[in-house]
């Protein structure tokens, strides 16, 4: 993507981010993630293509994780068909705003579509179009399980270092939220993040990741503002 004419992207906002609001630490004037993503992409010069009937689509992972294989296949197949149409059969990249959803579709879809993880898209597509104006002093970041599986932890750190002078990478095998299980069995999240607070520097008040439900658990267990990495990119380049 080197010319202005090339800057087109299909944006697939996950059903979680479409349906859930802001976290409890965010200001009342902060945008909800899907709105912020739209404005960030426009500011970076992108023309945004939204899939048809986007609110009817889901990557299928919630069904797959509960053992409903047929429902998962139906949802995944319907989404792939819609994204193929929106991207003109893979001509334009498809941005996912949650890493777990990206990982699931990556496993389910054919090779025609170019779907892009939120970390990779911000680092390789968006940051070259923007100027960092006000770096943060220190932030914490957490690579969720899907980020580790696809090997994008180093990219997460690289992106964060463009936006902050000091980056603390939280070390945990799994946060324990595991989709919606943190709502149903909070003890899993509490155990998974039992060492979280000790890893966060005293002067660090903000943390970032790429999974909305995981961020809910991080916020609860850390006591600091934890949200999508998109908010960090937006804030330091505004």
Image: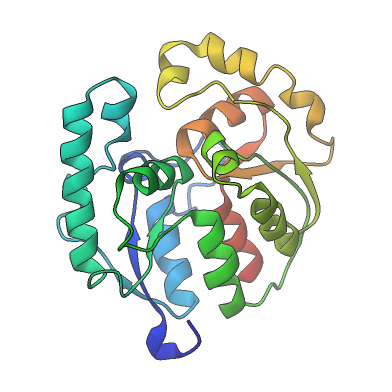
| Left or right: 143 in relation to 18 | right
The picture places residue 103, in percent across and down from the top left corner, at: 43, 44
What count of labels does the image hold? Answer: 0
Q: Is residue 12 above or below residue 59?
A: below
Please name whichever residue, 177 or 111, is drawn nearer the observer in this view of the structure.
Answer: 111
For residue 81, which quarter of the picture? bottom left
| Left or right: 226 in relation to 20 | right
| Left or right: 76 in relation to 159 | left
The picture places residue 218, in percent across and down from the top left corner, at: 60, 30
- Please say which color scheme the image uses: rainbow
Q: Is residue 235 above or below residue 187?
A: below
Q: Residue at x 18, y 66 (%)?
A: 85
Query: Which quadrant is the C terminus positioned in?
Result: bottom right
Q: Residue at x 44, y 46 (%)?
A: 98
The picture places residue 199, in percent across and down from the top left corner, at: 80, 30
Task: Report the residue that reaches farthest toward the front.
Answer: 111
Question: Is residue 57 in view from this perspective?
Answer: no
Please name whichever residue, 111 or 159, is drawn nearer the observer in this view of the structure.
Answer: 111
Q: Residue at x 51, y 13 (%)?
A: 186
Q: Residue at x 32, y 34 (%)?
A: 61
């Amino acid at each position: 993507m080197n010319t202005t004419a090339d800057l087109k992207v299909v944006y697939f906002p996950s059903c979680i981010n479409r349906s859930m609001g802001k976290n409890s630490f965010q200001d009342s004037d902060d945008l909800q993630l899907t709105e912020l993503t739209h404005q960030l992409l426009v500011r970076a010069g992108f023309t945004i293509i939204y899939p048809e009937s986007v609110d009817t689509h889901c990557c299928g992972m919630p069904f797959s994780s509960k053992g409903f294989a047929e429902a998962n296949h139906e949802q995944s197949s319907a989404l792939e068909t819609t994204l193929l149409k929106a991207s003109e059969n893979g001509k334009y990249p498809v941005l996912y705003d949650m890493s777990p959803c990206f990982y699931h579709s990556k496993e389910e879809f054919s090779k025609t579509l170019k779907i892009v993880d939120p970390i990779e898209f911000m680092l390789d597509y968006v940051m070259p179009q923007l100027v960092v104006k006000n770096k943060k002093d220190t932030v914490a970041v957490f690579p969720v399980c899907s980020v580790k599986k696809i090997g994008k932890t180093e990219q997460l750190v690289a992106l964060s270092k463009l936006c902050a002078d000091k980056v603390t990478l939280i070390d945990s095998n799994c946060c324990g939220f595991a989709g919606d299980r943190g709502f149903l069995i909070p003890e899993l999240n509490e155990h998974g993040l039992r060492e979280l607070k000790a890893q966060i520097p005293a002067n660090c008040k903000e943390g970032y990741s790429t999974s909305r439900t995981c961020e809910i658990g991080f916020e609860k267990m850390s006591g600091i503002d934890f949200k999508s990495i998109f908010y960090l990119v937006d804030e330091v380049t505004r």
